[in-house]
Image (tube, rainbow, N blue to C red):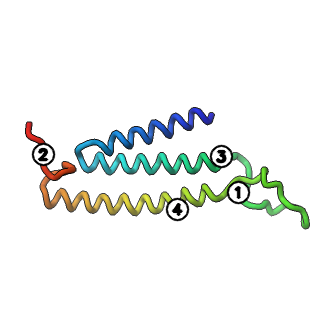
Amino acid sequence: MEAVISLAIGIVFGAGIWLVLRPRSFQVLCGLMLMSYAVNLFIFVMGRLWIDRPPLIPSDLPAGSAPDPAALADPLPQALVLTAIVIGFATTALYLVVMIGSRGLTGTDHVDGREPEP
């Protein structure tokens, strides 16, 4: 299962790099978004994906007993990914506004501000 997830993350990140190297600003924006999604998936997967395990101490724990740390999911990667999603959304909105302003000023969406000669 880890190999499939690693391959998927690699494909998404590779597609993001390919799009960042394209000559149009919208393609660059999409590439940046794909790379941020791949990094978020990587952080989330590195936190060990557990199914049916509580992220915090269960409430039905008997009084005076300590929980087994191996029985709990790690909440830190989940918190990091949630924070990264919010920051990624804000920076994507900023990139979009800058891209629209640049297109309005230059009349093109080519990354260097001019169309290549045919």
Q: Nearer the viewer, mark 2 or mark 1?
A: 2
Q: Residues within 10 Å of mark 4 (few under 14, many from 20)?
A: few
Residue 41, percent across and down? 53, 47
- 91 relative to 49, above or below: below
Label 2, label 1: how many angstroms apart (C-alpha)?
Answer: 52 Å
- The answer to which of 107 and 115 lies nearer the viewer is 115
The kind of residue on which mark 3 rests is: Leu
Label drawn at residue 83: 4
Q: Residues within 10 Å of mark 1 (few under 14, many from 20)?
A: some
The kind of residue on which mark 1 rests is: Pro
Q: Are marks 3 and 2 in contact (CB under 8 Å)?
A: no
Q: Which residue is mark 1?
A: 55
Query: The C terminus appears in which quarter of the rendering?
Result: top left
Label 2, label 4: how many angstroms apart (C-alpha)?
Answer: 38 Å
Q: Which residue is mark 2?
A: 115
Residue 101 falls in which quadrant of the image? bottom left
Query: The N terminus appears in which quarter of the rendering?
Result: top right
Label 2 vs 1, first from the N-terminus:
1
Q: Residues within 10 Å of mark 3 (few under 14, many from 20)?
A: few
The kind of residue on which mark 2 rests is: Glu
Label 4 vs 3, first from the N-terminus:
3
The kind of residue on which mark 4 rests is: Thr
